[in-house]
Image: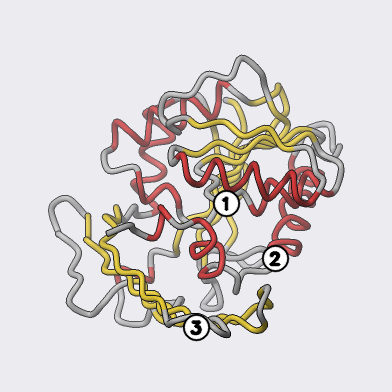
Amino acid sequence: MSGIYDDPWAYELACSFRDVPAEVDALLGWTVRHRSTGTPARTVLELAAGPAEHAREFARRGLAATALDLHPAMCAYADRQAKDEGVELDVVQDDMTAFALGRRFDLVATMLDSTSHLMTLDAFVAHLDRAADHLTADGLYVVEMSHPRDRLTDDPTVATGWTVERDGPGGQVRATVRWGEPSDKLDPVTQIADDHVTMTINEPGAPVRVIRDVVPYRFWTATELTAAIRLSGALETVAQYGDFGDVALTDPAAWRMITILRRA
């Protein structure tokens, strides 16, 4: 049975509740605010990009964009979508802990808590080292992670179930998504949970389609992130935000943990 990462169209549909243009606005705004030159980014690399929605949006705005992902299906989908949209996008299939592209970028970004696929501290440090090696002198690395409240309290900031709708070739497509069940417990030693994913897709004129998967998820605390940054030694923290605005990480309204890094 194929999983959610083997079906890029379904994965993109599941994540379509995100406002990608607004998030790209925030990312570009942070480059102006936090780069030492105060200039906007012109080159961008999205790591663990999946369907590369953010990279494609950067490309639509005229930036030289590169998307990197480990899954062949995701890479093929991102490349095909970019071509269909008429935008220039460089797609690379590689591991976010071991890539070496031989070039540097004004902005590197990892979105949608993709660092949860880094299962060990060694992997996280290797990932930070690779990101740092691909930054220009005043480039920034932006890491979007889930808010620690989601796993450490009984009052999570993000629901594990949601419904999305979007236009499809035959009419309105509707999908319900459950990413994680109450029975999915976080291992207190490894901090890894096997999240059960169920996605039910209703398309006009087509049978109902159900995708089921089990996705290993590694939870990282804020202090562990700080430790990984210090162990790497290649990066330093510039700022942290609790969403794609100016909400502080400690604000009750914060729903993400977004960290902005630069070369140390």
In this rendering, the label closer to the viewer, 1 or 2: 1
Q: CA distance from mark 3 to mark 2?
A: 34 Å
List the residue tagged with mark 3.
202
Q: Where's residue 173, x and y in %? A: 59, 80
In this rendering, the label closer to the viewer, 1 or 3: 3
Q: In percent of the image, x 71 and y 51: which residue is there?
A: 27
Question: Element at badge 3?
Answer: strand
Which disc, if any, is residue 51? 1
Q: In percent of the image, x 37 and y 51: which residue is there?
A: 116
**In the image, is 147 to the left or to the right of 220?**
right
Q: In percent of the image, x 34 and y 58: which residue is there?
A: 3
Tally of marks: 3
Q: Where's residue 126, x and y in %? A: 39, 27
Q: In percent of the image, x 72 and y 37: which residue is there?
A: 89
Q: Where's residue 186, x and y in %? A: 20, 64
If you read the primary sequence from the N terminus, does the residue marked by circle 1 or circle 2 appear first? Answer: 1
- Kind of residue at disc 2: Gly
57 vs 153: above or below: above
List the residue tagged with mark 2.
245
